[in-house]
Amino acid sequence: MTDLRLAVLIDADNVPYAHIKEMLEEITKNGTPTIKRIYADWTKPTVSGWKNVLLENAITPVQQYSYTSGKNSSDSALIIDAMDILYSDKVDGFCIVSSDSDFTRLATRLREAGMKVIGIGEKKTPLPFITACDKFIYIEILKPPVAETKEHNKPAKSKQKNNSLNKIDQGLVKLLSESVADLADESGWTFLGELGNFLIKKKADFDPRNYGFLKLLPLIKSTGRFIIDERETNNKSVKHIYIKAKG
């Protein structure tokens, strides 16, 4: 299966520019960015920080003047461009980079047209926009890890959770348990590879990194609620991992 061709549309007014490199690296994990545009009134000093990172990341700036005070006209420009791109048949999906709920209807409309929609925004992003996307990624978890200090005796576990946004609670355990049960075979086992995709379908912003773990398996192990079975395959370097709820 070839990579999805993605249109990356960035709302400069509603996301920080400091971690654009990490955002673009995350996007490439989901597909190939074939269109990269960023929208703002570039005459405003509030978006001046973006100007330094546009050229080095090959992002095309789109100028949209604010015709009325207090109104965000760049939102309208982004939405109009998205619909033009949709009907051009040049992409398979969209990545909307914003923390603004104004793009909720756009995300819904694009999905209705069969497009894959990925959202990237800050933790403050309203829930309607998050759930309107196929997948939503928080910018906070994309920040590079804090550089090591001279205090080498600190446990690695504390370092791993620097970017943790949520605590492991009963809500997460319930989500994992129900999802494992939904996918389980007659013996109660669930294939880990299927579980990850299924969790995102249930909860668009699900990501192990939200809880301080790079991968799903360490997160599951940390709950102490599941049995892990690593099964050999024909390829000695590859194992299939299955999960089962403890009795």
Image: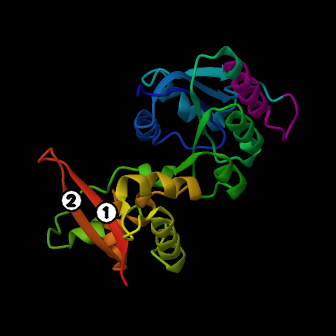
Q: Nearer the viewer, residue 108 or 185?
A: 185
Which residue is pictured at 43% across the width and 58% down the height? 195
Indicate whether residue 73 is drawn in magenta. Answer: yes
Q: Residue furthest bottom?
A: 247
- Nearest to the observer: residue 229 or residue 77: 229
Main SS of the magenta segment?
Answer: helix
- Residue 196 percent coordinates (x, y): 43, 55
Q: Residue at x 18, y 50 (%)?
A: 233
The one nearer the camera, 99 or 220, is: 220
Q: Is residue 94 above or below residue 59?
A: below
Position of 107 with respect to 243 (left or right) is: right
Q: Quadrant of residue 91?
A: top right
Disc 1 secondary structure class: strand
- Which residue is the site of mark 2? 231
Q: Residue furthest right?
A: 68
| Number of numbered discs overlaid on the protein picture | 2
Q: Which residue is mark 1?
A: 242
For the view shown, which residue lies furthest in the front direction? 186
- Tags 2 and 1 in contact by the CB under 8 Å rule? yes
Colour pattern of the rendering: rainbow
**Lower sequence index among marks 2 and 1:** 2
Q: Is residue 203 visible?
A: no
Q: How far apart, in angstroms, are the residues tagged by discs 2 and 1? A: 8 Å
Callout 2 amino acid: Arg
Of residues 201 and 82, the one nearer the viewer is 201
Q: Identify the residue shown where x is 65% and y is 54%.
A: 125
Q: Residues within 10 Å of mark 2 (few under 14, many from 20)?
A: few
Q: Amino acid at mark 1?
A: Tyr
In the rendered structure, which segment of residues is drawn in magenta?
Answer: 67-85
Residue 139 in picture, x, y percent from top left: 50, 49
